[in-house]
Image: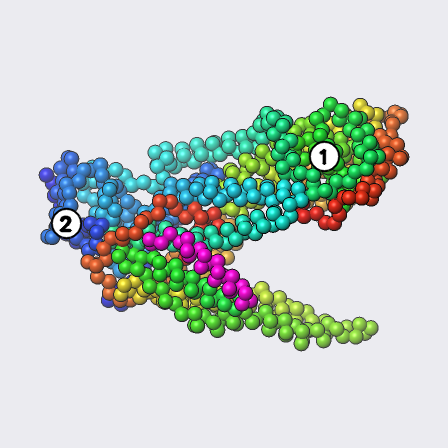
Amino acid sequence: MTSIGPDEDLWHYDGSSAVRHHPRVDWDADGFILRWETGASGPHRWGDLVPLGGTGGRSVYGLRGVNGWRLTFAGPPPAPFAVHLPLPARYGRWVDQLGLWKALGLFAAVAALVIFVVLRAPAWIAPHVPMAWEEKLGDAMFGDFGGRLCETPASRAAIEKLRRQLGNDVPIRQIGIANIRMVNAVALPGGRILLFDGLIREAKSPDELAGVLAHEIGHVRNRDTMTALVRQLGLSVLLGGFNGNVGGAINGLLAMSYSREAERAADQYSIDAMRAADISPLPTAAFFDKLGKLAGGEKAERTMSWMASHPVSAERRAAFEASAQKGKRYQPSLSAAEWRALVDACKQDPDVTKGPVLGF
Amino acid sequence: MADRGERAFGFSGTWRDYAPIALTNLLLTIVTLGVYRFWATTRTRRYLWSRTRFIDEPLEWTGTGMELFIGFLLVLGLFGLPFLFLQFGFQALILQGYMALAFTLAALAAAMIFYLAGVAVFRMVRYRLSRTWWHGIRGGSDDKGWAYGWSNVWRYLIAGFSLYLLMPWAMISLWNDRWSAMSFGPFRFSARAPVGPVYRRFLLFYLLPFGLIILAATIGLPQVAQDPSQAPDAAAVRTTLLFLAALFIGFYVLLPLIALLYYAKYMRVVIGGLSLSTLDFRFTARSKDWFLLILGDIALVVFTFGIGAIFLAYRHWKFFSDHLDATGEISRASLTQSTTAAPGQGEGLADAFDLGAI
């Protein structure tokens, strides 16, 4: 049996009161025991001793199972005592076992993989979500759009004609005109497309609208809305790991839009569908030109974040222009009367909800 | 207890000692996509506590990263996901035309967050005390803070109804409430901070914007509203510009400075009203000290392009322990172990609401 103390450089708290004891420590291969004038602690096994971070060269140990039990050396513990002790934890168990640099490398690799999977996974998962689920989800999220859809018998027929020409084999459940003064169109989960009234008013011809509609039909066919939903859900959970603010900002940047590739694919679908239907792509090209000017020209657009998910208008215009066949005689997608029916749909529909829309 | 003319609290850390901790924390937090931050917090606190001496022995932090992480996961599961769902649901309900239901639900959710934010502050203090040891003794509270959450709600509501004139009362009475529920060893903290002393500075802060507006109306308007048919002379233009600059400084420099003045007094008053058994606490930071602290913070962050932010926790803790003092005797024999239940998880709630220290 070996022993040290009692001296000023060695002290002990028993965890039941704040009184400081200066014990003598006796130990052998199995364990140790503390003894002081008014009491004793032990024998304890070496395995129950827990190293705690020290201060300014001090070494502090706790005892498993006894809260507040402390044994402190003013310097490093004497060598014959120290050989029985495990090292104090530093970074956390996994990192300590691996070593800092190895752990950094491993975590970085895992993080890169996680980011890659999170960015890619939605596109893998979305096609496997049953269409029926998506339809239910879309219905739950958007319902009848708060009674904001404009429809007359004539407008319904005109839209049906466009659908037949541009997406006859795509599972579209509804194409609606929303009484909202925004130059926009959206594809919603569940195979529904909304053309905003502002877009129809802004369009110079039915062919312009056809190009935009075909783009949204492309999103429906590629199930891009489901992809975006899955991504948003995944990011919300994953980015919980960061501080609220940082996570929210990244989430907003990544989640609320389709990827650029998805947008290009939808444009390509639009170009192909219009070619198959003999509709001229030039009015759509002109429309992108107008959109680009609305966004403050190409330079401004390239720096503006809200357009960042879409390819820049100038590129899109060029793609649509290039797809035009020289000398070809295109058919107008709608007759003048049918076009009129679309433009006037919101005026003619007596029971549509009006006024600014909330939550959108 | 400070019998040798020494302060009861002392901080002996150095930023060079802390730098390796801060830098590795930053690296590990980045490569784990933020998950390591719970362990990072723990390492930082273990360092800061162990370099903070109270009388003859440093403090000790025994919290773990895992318990902070579990607390975070619990809050995410219990509150985060329902709120995520509610966000989707709110939009859906509006689009389906259930306006009344949508706004009722949103109001309920807001009230719930308000309530939980109060509970979170309470539980954060309780968690930190329960993981803080000195001479083998820890602190804690037997109160779980659910009732405190309600008094947080109604006091701030009353402060709101009084056009925020009762704000200092709400802040100080809530401080007294939560610290009176805390204990260290067998002793309860007694928190009896008076509301009166902070009112002068609060009113200064409260009335300054009105003063500025009145000043603008009496001096500024005649300048601006001169006869438009005459070309304004250079002197008038200069006066107007000077006046606008003064107004800008008033709102963006003077107002925050007075807020700081108030906060400095507030901290001195609430900590000055705090005692534990025969120990009386004191906080000595003057407004000037706070001003220099914040100026230093800004410089540190700006001149290092943000990386210096990893030292903010260190700076704030050092500031806090440098200005904290206690007087009176405490008998070690009577300072026995705390019998309070130690919370199982960390600061999940406070963490979720992004609440700061103290």
Residue B161 part of the magenta segment? yes
Res A212 visible = yes
Q: Which region of the structure is painted magenta? A: B141-163
Q: Could you tell me residue A352's position as x and y percent?
A: 76, 44
Instruction: Give the vertical position of B322 relative to B109 (above or below).
Output: below
Image-based side of A227 in relation to B282, left or right: right
Q: Residue at x 43, y 72 (%)?
A: B197
Disc 2: CA contacts within 10 A as few (<14), some (14-19) or many (>=20): many
Q: Residue at x 43, y 65 (%)?
A: B172
Helix, strand or loop under label 2: loop
The residue closer to the viewer here, A133 or B280, is A133
Are the residues tagged 1 and 2 within 8 Å (C-beta)?
no
Q: Nearer the viewer, mark 1 or mark 2?
A: 1
Instruction: Give the vertical position of B299 relative to B194 (above or below).
Output: above
Instruction: Give the vertical position of B108 relative to A221 (above or below).
Output: below
| Quadrant placement of the C terminus of chain B | bottom left
Helix, strand or loop under label 1: strand
Amino acid residing under circle 2 = Pro
Residue B167 part of the magenta segment? no
Q: Which mark is residue A193?
A: 1
Amino acid residing under circle 1 = Ile
Q: Which mark is residue B190?
A: none
Q: Which is more N-terminal, label 2 or label 1?
A: 2
The residue closer to the viewer here, B154 or B277, is B154
Q: Could you tell me residue B212's position as x and y percent?
A: 61, 71
Magenta region's main secondary structure? helix
| Quadrant placement of the N terminus of chain B | bottom left
Q: Which mark is residue A23?
A: 2
Image-based side of B81 in relation to A284, left or right: left
Q: Could you tell me residue B350's position as x and y percent?
A: 44, 50
